[in-house]
Amino acid sequence: MFAAGFSSSITAPLAAAVCGKSLFVNSVAKSKNNDANIYKYTWITILSIGALFRLLQIKPIPAIIAAQGINGLLLPLVHRFVSGSS
């Protein structure tokens, strides 16, 4: 259980950093330095938010469950309208 939590606490900021880098790289000047900074600051921000939640003893489980439920309802609708299938 510890290993699963530890690996998730590292891979979630990694995934956010990769997404952040791909989203923001077009909005700023393209250079290796900017790419690295966006990646690094996104990773640090996500890790800091997680640490802050832990220090303040905030339990985000209800928000996560709600988001998953909303995704479960919205994704089939989005798929239907995007793909045009019946």
Image (tube, rainbow, N blue to C red):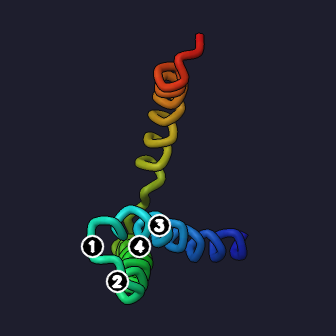
Image quarter of residue 22: bottom left
Q: Is residue 56 above or below residue 79?
A: below
The CA span between labels 4 and 1 is 21 Å
Q: Is residue 2 left or right of residue 60?
A: right
Question: Which residue shows up at 44% across the image and 42% down it?
Answer: 67
Task: List the single residue furthest toward the top.
Answer: 86
Residue occupied by mark 1: 28
> How far separated are the C-alphas under marks 2 and 4?
18 Å
User: Could you tell me if the residues under marks 3 and 4 are in contact, i.e. CB atoms within 8 Å?
Assistant: yes
Q: Position of residue 74 (x, y in %)?
A: 46, 28
Circles 2 and 1 in contact, beta carbons < 8 Å: yes
Any part of residue 48 in sight: no
Quarter of the image that includes the N terminus: bottom right
In the rendered structure, the answer to whether residue 54 lies left or right of residue 8 reads: left
Residue linked to disc 3: 16
**Res 34 label:** 2
State which tag comes first along the sequence, 3 or 4.
3
Which quadrant does the C terminus fall into? top right
Q: Would you identify the image quadrant in which residue 34 lies?
A: bottom left
Question: What kind of residue is marked 3?
Answer: Ala
What is the distance, in whole Å, between disc 3 and disc 4 at their CAs? 8 Å
For the residues marked 1 and 3, what is the alpha-carbon distance in whole angstroms? 18 Å
For label 4, the residue is: 46
Label 2 vs 4, first from the N-terminus: 2
- Residue type beneath disc 2: Asn
Q: Earlier in the sequence, mark 2 or mark 1?
A: 1
